[in-house]
């Protein structure tokens, strides 16, 4: 039974709709403030009540950040600045810490610390917390609820980021496809337009990102995109330098495209053409590697563990993605818009795609280990969950690619593959006619002189009069072109092997669009390793207390078993030496009570070698445990250990340090 390929317009429309829907869903669900760096500690701590005003406020981050004069602001209860505005660099070794001095003579009350900065991998981060001097009080500080990197500017920046990845893949992969797999494609108009549009897309997206960088990391106002002072400050950052370098490399890429689709197509001497291919290959590889390096040098690969290994691995990963998905895009265009694609070209691309997948698997495995770090982060963090989605899509894509490879083998195994030299020449001539017919049908007309010549020759051969109406000749030429195009299309669609290959490649491209969207969201999401480290640091730091202030702590836990995730809330009242009342609430992640078999508490004052003092609370009801008369023999910084057992074999112990007066 003869199979027919779907119409290009309908197929591409569905592909674009699917891409827009998936990209919108993923970007809507992504936390715009997520990034590689995270706040892991502060002094004073969040929620702390201190007896006297501290001299400064310190913030500790998981990774290096870029600080400006307004990156840390301390506001008093009335909303006035309580800091001097001088940021102090307190970094030492692997510890990333910055501080700001406070003014002298601050009154009692609740103070708000608001901070905003840019992490080393180019993403904006921000947050706020409070501490109190003497006793908590009401505060008039109203912090903006806009997330850094969010709003309209964040959405536009995210779209530009996606388009830059897509443009890079098609530009590099399309050029490689023509040079390695299908040299004749350099003269095919649809292929030329596809690669040129990819260059325009990448260039335009890079310019947009450069203009939006200032409001994206700062005010969030679209009007600030044209602030020249802000643009100047962006150019002095690592990300600004990377975007500027990308624009310069795109100038070299424009020269590569011009030579590939200009001088290369006009060369007829085999030796000259071979030399030009060698030069284009070397130059194109250097330019493509340089453009890929602008991502590696400014984003996730440039910070964290092993950046010296991660950056070249990231470059290889991007080039493999481009060779596979970009080449796939150009192959799809060629299968639908070009008169024909040689089977040898499809076979060569199949080998290129196989090599790319192998490189992607190796580099992706390393990147996953580096960014996730643990099995719990793979399933318990947003980055890990998105990575699982990406891995699943990769599996689907490889499966579809295997089907495409089978269609390619069937094409190669057809008896017609063994064409004689004469038949091959005839086929080449027919393809040339079809190409001219396609161009004629797209233009809507042919040169009148050529039409007159063609009709004159035809009539001269048949003995007809040489006097021919030019308009009639042009009309006849257009009709012949349309008929030739329709005939070639019927012959092409009547080939079940080629139709099957077109359908599988179209499906592969659709999945690749979604995969690229997931990858784009991953680049703006906090890696699982960092998220877990920040969570552990937050759990380890607890609120300080002054005399007669209850101690309230919150401890997330994960025992690893069934129903093993939740939160422990512990309250010690009045939080002073002597007898105290202890209440423990065990909750699920959604806030509902979690009934566990056992909860134990131990108190240790390490500075005085006191403890651990065990406490065995009684179960009051599901998720609620209590103990009365808990003795705190002396003041100091006590370590509270809470052991939660969720089954016969699953349990975990959580620590929290609190100051008891």
Image: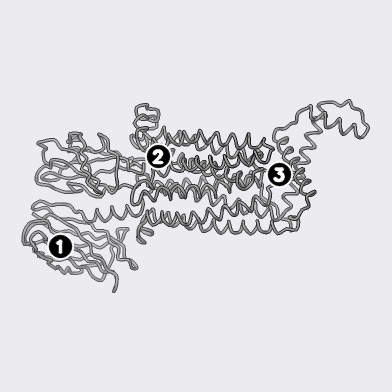
Q: Which of marks 2 and 1 is in front?
A: 2
Asked whether the residues under the numbered discs 3 and 1 touch, taking CB atoms below 8 Å apart as contact, a structural biologist would say: no
Residue at numbered disc 1: 582
Is residue 73 left or right of 435 when viewed as pictured?
left
Asked whether the residues under the numbered discs 2 and 1 touch, taking CB atoms below 8 Å apart as contact, a structural biologist would say: no
Local crowd size for mark 2, using a 10 Å CA cut-off: few (<14), some (14–19), many (≥20) = many
Residue 154: give its label: 2
Residue 339: give its label: 3
Local crowd size for mark 3, using a 10 Å CA cut-off: few (<14), some (14–19), many (≥20) = many
Q: Indicate the position of residue 552 as horizontal and vertical percent values.
A: 18, 55
Q: Nearer the viewer, mark 2 or mark 3?
A: 3
In the depicted view, which residue is nearer to us: 133 or 375?
375
Q: Nearer the viewer, mark 3 or mark 1?
A: 3
Local crowd size for mark 1, using a 10 Å CA cut-off: few (<14), some (14–19), many (≥20) = many
Q: Can residue 80 be seen in this view?
A: no
Which of pointers 3 and 1 lies earlier in the amino acid sequence? 3
Q: Indicate the position of residue 5 as horizontal and vertical percent values.
A: 68, 51
Secondary-structure class at tag 2 = helix
Spatial separation of the CA atoms under disc 2 and disc 1: 46 Å
Secondary-structure class at tag 3 = loop
Quadrant location of residue 435?
A: top right
Which of pointers 2 and 1 lies earlier in the amino acid sequence? 2
Secondary-structure class at tag 1 = strand
* Residue found 41% across the figure and 54% down from its top: 367
User: Where's the C terminus, which quadrant?
Assistant: bottom left
* Residue found 10% across the figure and 55% down from its top: 660
């Amino acid at each position: 039974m003869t199979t027919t390929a779907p119409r290009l317009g309908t197929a591409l429309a569905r592909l674009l709709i699917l891409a827009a829907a998936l990209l919108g869903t993923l970007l809507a669900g992504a936390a715009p403030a997520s990034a590689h760096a995270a706040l892991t500690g502060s002094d004073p701590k969040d929620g702390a009540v201190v007896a006297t005003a501290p001299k400064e406020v310190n913030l500790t981050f998981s990774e290096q950040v870029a600080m400006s004069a307004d990156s840390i602001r301390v506001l008093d209860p009335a909303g006035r600045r309580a800091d001097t505005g001088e940021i102090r660099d307190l970094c030492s070794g692997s510890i990333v810490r910055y501080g700001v001095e406070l003014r002298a003579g601050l009154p009692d009350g609740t103070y708000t610390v608001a901070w905003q900065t840019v992490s080393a991998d180019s993403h904006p981060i921000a947050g706020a917390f409070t501490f109190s001097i003497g006793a908590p009080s009401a505060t008039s500080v109203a912090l903006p609820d806009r997330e850094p990197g969010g709003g309209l500017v964040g959405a536009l920046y995210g779209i530009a980021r996606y388009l830059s990845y897509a443009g890079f893949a098609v530009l590099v992969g399309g050029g490689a496809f023509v040079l390695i797999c299908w040299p004749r494609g350099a003269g095919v108009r649809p292929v030329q337009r596809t690669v040129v549009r990819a260059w325009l897309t990448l260039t335009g997206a890079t310019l947009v990102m450069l203009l939006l960088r200032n409001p994206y990391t700062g005010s969030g106002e679209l009007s600030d995109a044209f602030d020249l002072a802000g643009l100047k400050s962006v150019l002095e950052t690592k990300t600004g330098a990377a975007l500027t370098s990308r624009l310069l490399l795109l100038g070299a890429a424009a020269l590569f495209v011009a030579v590939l689709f200009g001088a290369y197509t006009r060369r007829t001497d085999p030796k000259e053409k071979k030399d030009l291919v060698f030069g284009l290959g070397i130059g194109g590889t250097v330019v493509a590697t340089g453009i890929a390096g602008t991502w590696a040098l400014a984003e996730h690969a440039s910070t964290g563990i092993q950046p010296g290994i991660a950056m070249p691995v990231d470059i290889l990963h991007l080039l493999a993605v481009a060779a596979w998905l970009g080449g796939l895009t150009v192959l799809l265009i060629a299968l639908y818009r070009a008169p024909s694609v040689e089977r040898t070209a499809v076979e060569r691309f199949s080998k290129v795609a196989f090599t790319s997948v192998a490189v992607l698997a190796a580099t992706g495995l390393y990147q996953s280990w580096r960014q996730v770090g643990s099995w719990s982060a793979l399933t318990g963090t947003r980055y890990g969950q998105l990575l699982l989605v990406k891995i699943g899509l990769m599996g689907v894509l490889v499966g579809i690619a295997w089907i495409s490879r089978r269609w390619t083998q069937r094409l190669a195994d057809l008896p017609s593959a063994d064409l004689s030299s004469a038949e091959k020449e005839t086929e080449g001539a027919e393809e040339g006619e079809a190409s001219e017919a396609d161009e004629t049908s797209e233009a809507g007309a042919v040169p009148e002189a050529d039409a007159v010549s063609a009709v004159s020759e035809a009539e001269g051969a048949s003995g007809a009069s040489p006097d021919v109406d030019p308009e009639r000749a042009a009309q006849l030429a257009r009709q012949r072109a349309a008929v030739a195009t329709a005939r070639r299309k019927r012959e092409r669609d009547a080939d079940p092997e080629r139709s099957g290959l077109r359908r599988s490649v179209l499906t592969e491209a659709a999945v690749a669009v979604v995969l690229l969207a997931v990858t784009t969201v991953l680049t703006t999401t906090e890696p699982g390793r960092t998220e877990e480290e920040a969570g552990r640091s937050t759990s380890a730091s607890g609120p300080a207390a002054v005399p007669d202030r209850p101690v309230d702590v919150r401890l997330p836990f994960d025992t690893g078993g069934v129903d093993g995730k939740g939160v422990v809330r512990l309250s010690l009242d009045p939080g002073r030496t002597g007898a105290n009342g202890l209440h423990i609430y065990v909750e699920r992640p959604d806030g509902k009570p979690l009934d566990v078999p056992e909860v134990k508490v131990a108190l240790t004052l390490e500075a005085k070698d006191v403890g651990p003092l065990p406490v065995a609370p009684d179960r009051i009801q599901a998720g609620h445990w209590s103990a009365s008369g808990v003795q705190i023999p002396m003041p100091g910084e006590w370590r509270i250990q809470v052991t939660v057992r969720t089954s016969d074999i699953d349990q975990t112990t959580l620590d929290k340090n609190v100051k008891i007066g």
